[in-house]
Image (tube, rainbow, N blue to C red):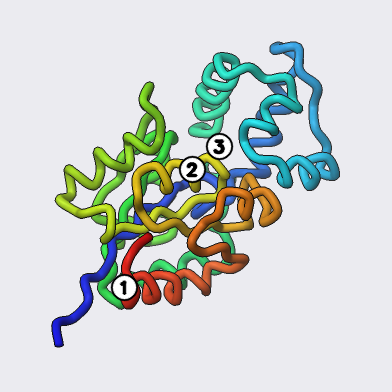
């Protein structure tokens, strides 16, 4: 019997692998006044994580154009503070287990490639990944996923997208790849489940089981 194809796991970076949420919120609060926006407290963040991305922006009074501009500024400042950012607890062990189980790993992010490489190198994880696709696209994340699959010569049925935002799950659905919603990042479980991901997990230790399940049963 032929060995099932090992899927390619494509990871989001911020909030999924790197615990940038707390640092990012601090930067947001520093910049908010300049955009006429209110700052947020830790208590408010817990409630905001229940909202999907569109509802979150609407609640905060942030237009799509403002979100792009503000996001760019936050990423620029974050680059200067990456040495303050830690790895999500349990992610290092999960990535090592996936790599040793011969799953291919890659990163698709709006963060800069330099940020990601610097971060992964600090935790001795850079060599575990086959590629880092960084930057933003006018055509959205689903098109970026499809571009990665074409470049890597991987069919959608042989790929899994792992992310921490509802828009990540939407992008996975539109690009016809399997999806793993992690509930420790930007959006919590309540919001993530509204997008119908294939898997919704609370711990990085569950990643290997998700990958093995897709390997056995195939993609969506």
Total label count? 3
> Which numbered disc, 2 or 1, marks the residue that appears first in the sequence?
2
Residue shown at 48% from the left, 61% from the top: 198
Using the image as rendered, state which of residue 194 and residue 116 is in the foreground. Answer: 194
The answer to which quarter of the image holds residue 158 is bottom left
- Label number found at residue 170: 2
Contact between labelled residues 3 and 1, with CB atoms less than 8 Å apart: no
Q: Is residue 146 visible?
A: yes
Disc 2 or disc 3, which is closer to the eye?
Answer: 2
Q: In the drawing, does residue 163 fall left or right of residue 186?
A: left
* CA distance for labels 2 and 1: 22 Å
User: Where the C terminus falls, by quadrant?
Assistant: bottom left
* CA distance for labels 2 and 3: 30 Å
In the displayed image of the protein, which residue is found farthest to the bottom?
1
From this view, report whether residue 136 is shown above or below residue 149: above
The answer to which quarter of the image holds residue 35 is top right
Using the image as rendered, state which of residue 111 and residue 143 is in the foreground. Answer: 143
- Label number found at residue 215: 1
Which structural element holds mark 3?
A: loop
From this view, report whether residue 41 is shown above or below residue 66: below
Contact between labelled residues 1 and 2, with CB atoms less than 8 Å apart: no
- Label number found at residue 81: 3
Using the image as rendered, state which of residue 31 and residue 108 is in the foreground. Answer: 108
């Amino acid at each position: 019997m032929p060995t099932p194809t090992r899927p390619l796991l494509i990871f989001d970076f911020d909030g999924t692998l790197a615990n940038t949420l707390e640092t990012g919120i601090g930067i947001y609060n520093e910049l908010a006044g300049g955009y006429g926006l209110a700052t947020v407290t830790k208590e408010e963040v817990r409630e905001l994580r229940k909202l999907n991305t569109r509802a979150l922006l609407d609640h905060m009074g942030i237009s799509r154009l403002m979100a792009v501009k503000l996001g760019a500024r936050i990423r620029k400042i974050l680059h200067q503070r990456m040495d303050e950012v830690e790895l999500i607890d349990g992610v290092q062990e999960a990535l090592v287990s996936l790599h040793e189980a011969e799953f291919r790993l890659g990163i698709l992010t709006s963060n800069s490639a330099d940020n990601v490489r610097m971060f992964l190198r600090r935790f001795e994880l850079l060599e575990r990944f086959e590629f880092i696709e960084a930057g933003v696209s006018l055509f959205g994340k689903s098109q970026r996923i499809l571009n990665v699959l074409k470049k890597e010569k991987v069919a959608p049925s042989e790929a899994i997208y792992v992310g921490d935002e509802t828009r990540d799950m939407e992008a996975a659905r539109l690009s016809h790849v399997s999806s793993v919603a992690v509930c420790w990042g930007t959006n919590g479980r309540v919001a993530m489940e509204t997008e119908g991901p294939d898997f919704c997990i609370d711990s990085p230790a569950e990643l290997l089981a998700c990958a093995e399940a897709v390997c056995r049963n195939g993609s969506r």
